[in-house]
Image (cartoon, helix red, strand yellow):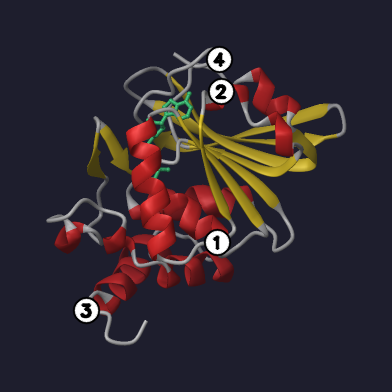
Amino acid sequence: MPGDPYALAREAMVEHQILARGVRDERVLAAMRGVPRHLFVPPGYERAAYDDMPLPIGSGQTISQPYIVAQMTALLEPGPRDRVLEIGAGSGYQAAILSLLCERVITIERLPEVAEVARANLARVGASNVEVHVADGTLGWPASAPYAGILVTAATPVVPEPLLAQLSDGGRLVAPVGGREIQELVRVRRQGDRLVQEPAGAVRFVPLIGEHGW
Ligand code: SAH
């Protein structure tokens, strides 16, 4: 965006935090360059928006570290015609990244006040192909299933069964699975009736709270 005071900070973020750690997917890199992350952090935090860390967004929740957003997005392999489900809208930043890469994004947030912030942030950047719903995301969002991609952005003890049921054939699910303190990022790919799971490194997320979470 012309006149964006954070354009250089954003380019440095992509180069030093994301490219340098091995995310090479050009579409993902373009999306990380394209979304003004400083519009998704609380007022007063703009200068820290491009730092290599998660930041608080209120209500005890966080916006994930830029690299983790890029890594999870690359693992999801979002396609231009895909319908994608995100669990944990938070600031709306991850949904804004996905909105540039897919046809339609449905994001679920448990806390109404957080969902309001996500909606406002997404409207501000003109992400018109994103819907924010207030619900228990561990149940998925059956009304628009199946999904080519499902991204869980809160820590869960197991992958919620309803989400696996809402994954299309060939679809990918990415989630932090494990304990309260530390989790393993996993990608599950549906191949017909088979679910193929791969690990992708250790991460740390706030808990997924719901019927099929904590
Ligand atoms: N993706 C967000 C960060 C998410 S932080 C971003 O880009 O900013 C995790 C979010 O998941 C929090 O906002 C939390 O309230 C939400 N959450 C926790 N349990 C949930 C559930 N069962 N369903 C939907 N959202 C949930």
Disc 2 beta carbon < 8 A from ligand 1? yes
Q: Amino acid at mark 2?
A: Thr
Q: Which residue sits furthest right? A: 192
**Label disc, if present, on residue 196 of the rendered structure:** none
- Classify the position of ligand 1 by quadrant: top left, top right, bottom left or bottom right: top left
Q: What quarter of the picture does the N terminus occupy?
A: bottom left
Lower sequence index among marks 2 and 3: 3
Check the image and report above or below for 200 versus 180. below
- First in sequence: mark 2 vs mark 4: 2
Please give the name of the residue rendered at 40% of the width and 39% of the height, measured from the top-left corner.
Answer: 115
Numbered disc 2: secondary structure: helix
Tell me which numbered mark, 1 or 4, is placed earlier along the sequence.
Answer: 1
For this orientation, the residue located farthest to the left is 44
In the image, taking residue 43 as reference, residue 68 lies left or right, namely right
- The disc label shown at residue 5, or none: 3
Mark toward the viewer: 1 or 2: 1
Q: Which residue is mark 2?
A: 138
Check disc 1 and report its element: helix, strand or loop: loop
**Type of amino acid under label 1:** Ser
* Tag 3: amino acid: Pro
**Residue at mark 1:** 128
The residue identified by callout 4 is: 212
- Pointer 3: residues within 10 angstroms few (<14), some, or many (20+)? few
Q: Please state the horizontal and vertical placement of residue 137, each as a whole percent of the image.
A: 54, 27
